[in-house]
Amino acid sequence: MQPAFRQSYGRTRRRRSHHALSPTTQTLCPLSGMPKAHHRACKQSGYVRAGLRIKVPKLGIGIGND
């Protein structure tokens, strides 16, 4: 089934104006000083948040500072 009326170019563009991607926010890891994404583990130290450090040797996360 097809729509009753064609949607205008402007209306389509206005709807899609909210589809733009926003850049990721970077912060510095307090342990290693390297940039890391929010809510992600630091590649070198494994720091996620205060009191939580993880180690994943297979991915190379948290094995830099032993």
Image (cartoon, rainbow, N blue to C red):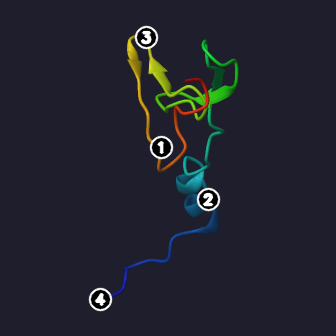
Q: Please name the residue that numbered disc 3 is placed on.
A: 50
| Amino acid at the residue labelled 1 | Pro
Regarding mark 1 in the picture, which secondary structure is present there?
A: loop
Q: Is residue 41 above or below residue 12?
A: above
Q: Please name the residue that numbered disc 2 is placed on.
A: 13
Q: Whole-Å distance between the Cαs marked 2 and 1?
A: 46 Å
- Marks 3,1: beta carbons within 8 A: no
Q: Which of pointers 2 and 1 lies earlier in the amino acid sequence?
A: 2
Q: Which of pointers 2 and 3 lies earlier in the amino acid sequence?
A: 2
Which numbered disc covers residue 1?
4
Near-viewer residue (47 or 27): 47
Near-viewer residue (26 or 13): 26
Q: Residues within 10 Å of mark 2 (few under 14, many from 20)?
A: few
Q: Give the label, 2 or 3, closer to the camera.
A: 3
Q: Residues within 10 Å of mark 3 (few under 14, many from 20)?
A: few
Regarding mark 4 in the picture, which secondary structure is present there?
A: loop
Q: Please name the residue that numbered disc 1 is placed on.
A: 57
Is residue 55 rendered to the left or right of residue 15?
left
Q: Whole-Å distance between the Cαs marked 2 and 3?
A: 43 Å
Q: Quadrant of the N terminus?
A: bottom left
Q: Give the label, 4 or 1, closer to the camera.
A: 1
**Image coords of residue 61 (percent x, y):** 52, 38
Regarding mark 3 in the picture, which secondary structure is present there?
A: loop
Q: Which of pointers 4 and 3 lies earlier in the amino acid sequence?
A: 4
